[in-house]
Image (spheres, helix red, strand yellow):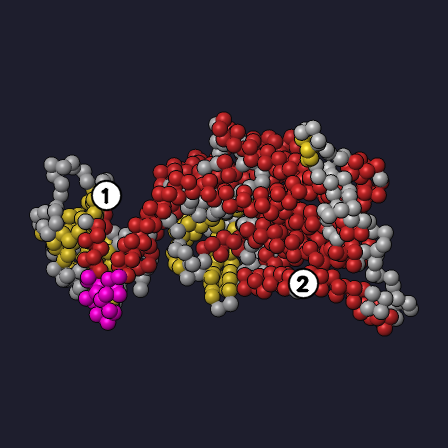
Amino acid sequence: MAGGEKKGYEPWQDVNANPLVRIEGVSKTYGEICAVDDLSLDIYPGEFFSLLGSSGCGKTTLLRILAGFEQPTKGRIYIDDMDITTVPPYDRPVNMMFQSYALFPHMNVEANIGFGLRQEKLPRAEIRERVADALKLVKMEAFSRRKPDQLSGGQRQRVALARALVKRPKILLLDEPLGALDKKLREHTQFELVNIQEKLGITFIMVTHDQEEAMTMSTRMAVMNDGVIVQLGTPPYIYEYPATRFIAEFVGAANVLEGRVMGFFEDALSVYSEEYDCELLIHHPKPMDMGASVAVALRPEKVLITEKPVNVASAANTLSGIVAEIAYLGDISIYHIRTSGGKLIQVQLTNRNRMENPGPTWEQKVYLTWHSTSGVVLET
Amino acid sequence: MALNKWSSVGNMRERQSAVLPQTLLGRFRLWLINFMNWRRVRGIARSLRGRPLVILVPILWFSIFFLLPFLFVLKISFAESLLAQPPFSALLHWSSDGILQLRLNVGNFLMLLEDSLYFSALINSIKVAAISAFLTLFIGYPMALGISRVQSSWRLVLLMLVILPFWTSFLIRVYAWIGLLKNNGLLNNLLLWIGIIDKPLPLLHSDFALYIGIVYSYLPFMVLPLYATLVKLDQSLLEAAEDLGCRPLSAFWRVTFPLSLPGVIAGSLLVFIPAVGEFVIPDLLGGPDSLMIGKILWTEFFNNRDWPVASAIAVLMLLLLVVPMMLFQRIQDRPDNHGNGLRNEL
């Protein structure tokens, strides 16, 4: 479970692996509203698991059910094969890092971190030692005597992390752990969190609405919507093979082209999109019925944009259009191209050259091409 | 320039809303411009001397209604009792050879120290007030905690119920307790009717009745500040405590109670201070032997007409209450100072 083993650590692929957390058919309803709907999920030891979704998708409710603050209306939860569905929060081998950090304002950093250990009635020397270790882990040794209101947001976040980790839980729950930090600090802390997780080997379950955060940190992530998991998988898998239109558009950006199946050759699907007046050739393992309507997701960075037509064998997977909008982001530029059908398509261009060759400009005619492996057929 | 801009906007509006009389709108616009200029002038004046003005109001208030009367009382406490109008001697007077004499009579204070009546009355008052503060805390804390935890729509109703007794005169409510506690009052009749007792209990004019009166009257002063601190308490702190292994009861003692201490102190002081000097409740409900300093003060003023001694009691009582409180405040401020010092250091 240590850092070295991380590469290729995929227990979910192993049929014999024993999950650490088993969520079985859990539902939570508040009156009429169904926050979590018959959700089942296995999480394996040593994972950094993310629950990703927009607000109100039920991810926080699920995390609070795992912590024990909410009782599921239906279903069971097991940790290490022990049913903990009705176990109160103070008896669970689980600790939580709160979104607001929830540091005790009347205690200094040291007392905050030692709170849980003192509650366990551990010997004083051991508490001191473990608090010192936790302070070192989050690099807060110099601030041990400060009160929470004398700390910056990032420092408070570290204290909250140390306080939750010092109890050595089997699972650490993180509720939007980086939500209150500014962008630069957030990026830095992402890597630090992953390092700490690999060092300690504790299973992390994180709730976030930020897809970038989930992608950088997690071993696997579950995209949630309306109380159910819409897709579960590793970040690259979910990004490259989004199952539905919702995921394609929520995780990263995507152009969704609607069309009809025109044929299937070996392992490629031929689709004609009327709205873009374009023939698409998509790598797809399963044959589909002729004439079936499909939606195809095409990521902006997978489309090549050129100022002259590219010589290709067939007209499939090519489009032409006029530059309608350019968003210059420094490293990349995002182009909105108006195709002949009037539809917009989003394309990303890496700004490899400097000013002498700035790339296509407004109202210029451009040509778009992509590979047959670029598009993904979405479930409808 | 700015004026032209304004008038053009105004003209546009006028054209749009032709229903309004033009002259009135024009006049309104002029008035608005004048008003805004006037506001700006006033704003400058305020920025120059706003702060002293703001402080001046409470200073004036306290000087006229608190400091000045206290100085009168202090003056009288050093005078001699006279059978005259007013019933005390002047401190300053001119002697025949043109010397201004200041005559301070410390005999009143000496008498207070010599006669154990006053001392024991003061001790008894403090005891009664302290026990009352503790009882109101004991009853008020669960009430305040309960109100702060119910749905917000219920909170207002429950708070109203706490404040509701204030809508009736204090005196009438204390008299009502006489009706409840006297020998053929409601409580005794009820107990007789049930058959628990066979002759009326002497409830009225006892320490029991005294405490009931004080606790009943001062309970809202305890509940309101407690509620104010408890309702602000971040619920996630309690969840964090539970998450870290606290059962609800230990979460209360380790998180809720320490964080509500400002409310506990404010409520206790709001009950304790007026209860020390309480006169009406011990007089109407308390027993003949329940000596309280407020009652003695009243007797000295109105029965004995000894204004200087009564004033001396008032001065002494004030000092005995204010000095500990100032010390307490200084202790309260210390952690804050410490924090600032630390912040400056780093």
Residue A238 at least partly seen: yes
> Does the stretch in magenta take in B13?
yes
A115 is higher (above) or lower (below) than B193: above
From the top left corner, tell me how far across and down residue B93 is, in percent.
Answer: 69, 35
Q: Main secondary structure of the magenta part?
A: helix
Residue, disc 2 = B169
Task: Pick whichever, A176 or B301, lies toward us.
Answer: B301
The dot on residue A329 is 1
| Front-most of residues A250 and B41 | B41
Q: Residue at x 80, y 69 (%)?
A: B186
Determine the residue positioned at 26% across, 57% down: B30
Circle 2 SS class? loop
| Relative depth, front residue between B234 and A362 | B234
From the viewer's perspective, is residue A340 above or below residue B241?
Answer: below
B178 inside magenta stretch: no
View extreme (bottom): residue: B193
What is the magenta range? B11-27
Mark 2: amino acid:
Ser
Going by the picture, which residue comes out furthest to the top? B345
